[in-house]
């Protein structure tokens, strides 16, 4: 890891650690957003042999300071959700660009980060696809079971199908190998049949 990459990752993690929501991991309290970012980076090392610095930063910054503007501040429904998600991506890109500038990265690198975080070019841009694959795998591995209990069955099937369409064949294979409860596995199987 280069000095400037390490500087940006450490700065991102400092911001992540300010998340007021904490989770218990092996008896230790960890900021929820920091844990999410670490999980994203862990999946990146599984998916990509030698990810570039811009991709590593993008993956680490994807959910940066999401607690500052909550989903509830936007209208209900798909349009409200998509607007909130877009605005979150813009904020994360802007904050990350500042951290990158302080570490000596170029404006072009910062613009690249914004493209990746905002998932522009999904399915065409390998870095954007890698970030999306990480996000989908983190969700399926760590948050899917709890989330699926809160969502109506048919709606959950549609969410799984949409998620699956965004993933690469490599991510599909990894997802199918994840340990899941019997009910989660049945839900995935039903959605994909």
Image (cartoon, grey):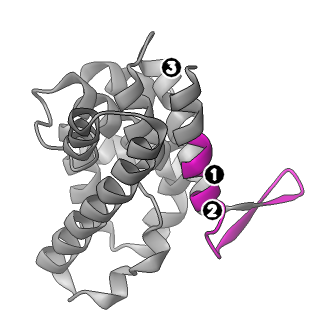
Residue 122 image point, x, y percent: 15, 37
Give the magenta part as a residue range. Answer: 9-29
| Residue nearest the observer in this picture, 143 or 11 | 11
51 or 26: which is nearer to us? Answer: 51
22 in magenta: yes
Compared with 76, 136 (above or below) is above
Q: In the image, which disc is placed on residue 32? A: 2
Which residue is drawn at the image coordinates 48% and 75% (left, top)? 67
38 with respect to 74 (left or right): right
Q: Which residue is mark 3?
A: 46
Would you say the residues marked 2 and 1 are in contact, meaning their CB atoms lie under 8 Å apart?
A: yes
Q: Is residue 175 shown above or below 62?
A: above
Q: Residue at x 64, y 68 (%)?
A: 18
Q: Quadrant of the C terminus?
A: top left
Rendered view: 102 above or below 133: below
Residue plotted at (53% across, 34% down): 41
Residue 1 within the magenta-colored segment of the rendering: no
């Amino acid at each position: 890891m280069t000095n400037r990459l390490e500087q940006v990752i450490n700065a991102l993690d400092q911001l992540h650690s300010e998340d007021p929501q904490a989770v218990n991991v092996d008896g230790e309290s960890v900021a929820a957003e920091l844990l999410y970012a670490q999980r994203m980076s862990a999946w990146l090392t599984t998916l990509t042999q030698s990810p570039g610095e811009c991709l590593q930063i993008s993956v680490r910054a994807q959910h940066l300071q999401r607690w500052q503007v909550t989903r509830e501040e936007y209208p209900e429904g798909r349009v409200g959700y998509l607007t909130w998600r877009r605005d979150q991506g813009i904020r994360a890109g802007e904050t990350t660009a500042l951290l990158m500038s302080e570490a000596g990265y170029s404006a072009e690198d910062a613009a690249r980060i914004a493209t990746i975080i905002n998932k522009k070019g999904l399915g065409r841009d390998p870095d954007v696809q890698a970030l999306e694959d990480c996000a989908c795998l983190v969700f399926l591995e760590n948050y899917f079971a709890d989330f699926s209990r809160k969502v109506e069955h048919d709606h959950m099937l549609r969410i799984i199908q949409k998620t699956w369409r965004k993933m690469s064949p490599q991510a599909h294979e990894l997802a199918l190998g994840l340990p899941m409860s019997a009910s989660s596995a049945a839900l995935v199987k039903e959605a994909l049949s």
